[in-house]
Amino acid sequence: MRALIVADVHSNLAALQAVLDDCARRGGFDRVWCLGDAVGYGPDPEECLSLLRGQGAAFVAGNHDLGVAGVVDLGDFNDAAAEACIWTAGRLAAGDIAFLSALPEVAHEDDFTLVHGSLRRPVWEYLVNEDAALATFRLMETRFCLVGHSHTPFVCRERGRGCEFEAFPEGEPVVFGVDRLILNPGSVGQPRDGDPRASYAVYDSDSGAITHSRAEYDIAATQARMRLAGLPEMLAERLSFGR
Ligand code: ZN
């Protein structure tokens, strides 16, 4: 079984399509696991949701998904993010809003827990330091946990009572040993690790390994659609830099 793991697609259809095509060239996938923030920021919320739902993806709720659905207060977002949430809500049909508002905070697939932020605060916590990682390790009931939200790929390995963050190497399978791991595949639609290419991962149950990959996509096309939609300019600009 091969699972395509995507996080923070953020309504960027060109990036999502590039990931699906890239993954198909590298051995394909049987399932899709989406770690939240399918929508928000980008120009194609409806298309991204219907593409992911059409693949039968397993979803968990991201803060933007719930902001768009009106489940969390937009006062908790910065101005540009809130503006994009309002624009996105206006583009979605009632069925999509109902789908987003009903998303679970945590899901389990095989030996993986799926969550957007962390197990301590599923929708909002950025799992970027040892304190947050250890809290999630304490709450994990599976060997592996997949997170998004920070838009930064990493592997975090449990070591005794502590843990270590490592780079998630591109194209080199991370083979599972005895350690419990928290992994972030990076963001499809708005990378923030300085590499503007769409970021994703694939889990292969036969080899017991997970591989991080990047896919080039037409950034200018997404930016043009964002400007046409009147979305905040800084959200379009940052796609060029992966920041
Ligand atoms: Zn996000």
Image (cartoon, grey):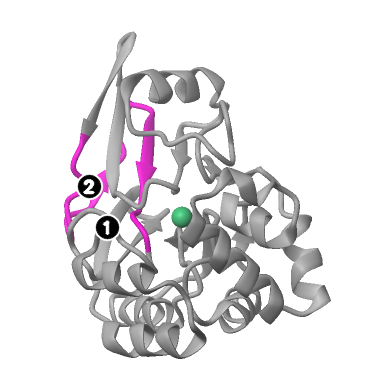
Q: Residue at coordinates 50% horizontally, 56% vertically from top-left? A: 79
Q: Secondary structure at mark 2?
A: loop
Q: Give the quarter of the image for residue 215.
A: bottom left
Residue nearest the viewer, comparing 143 with 46? 46
Give the answer, above or below, for where 183 lies relative to 198. above
Dot 2 or dot 1: first in sequence order is 2
Q: Secondary structure at mark 1?
A: strand
Q: Is mark 1 within 8 Å of ligand 1?
A: no
Residue in the foreground of this view, choosing between 201 and 39: 39
Compared with residue 129, is residue 37 higher up or lower down, i.e. above or below? below
Q: Which residue is mark 2?
A: 168
In the picture shown, does residue 161 fall above or below 195?
A: above
Residue located beneath label 1 in the image: 212
Residue at 51 percent of width and 74 percent of height? 11
- Marks 2/1: CA–CA distance: 7 Å
> What's the magenta bit mostly, secondary-structure-wise?
loop
Going by the image, does 135 lie left or right of 193?
right
Mark yes or no: residue 56 visible: no
Q: Which residues are magenta?
A: 166-187
* Residue type marked 1: His
Q: In the rendered structure, does residue 181 fall within the stretch colored magenta?
A: yes
Residue appearing at x 33%, y 55% in the figure = 186
Q: Are marks 2 and 1 in contact (CB under 8 Å)?
A: yes
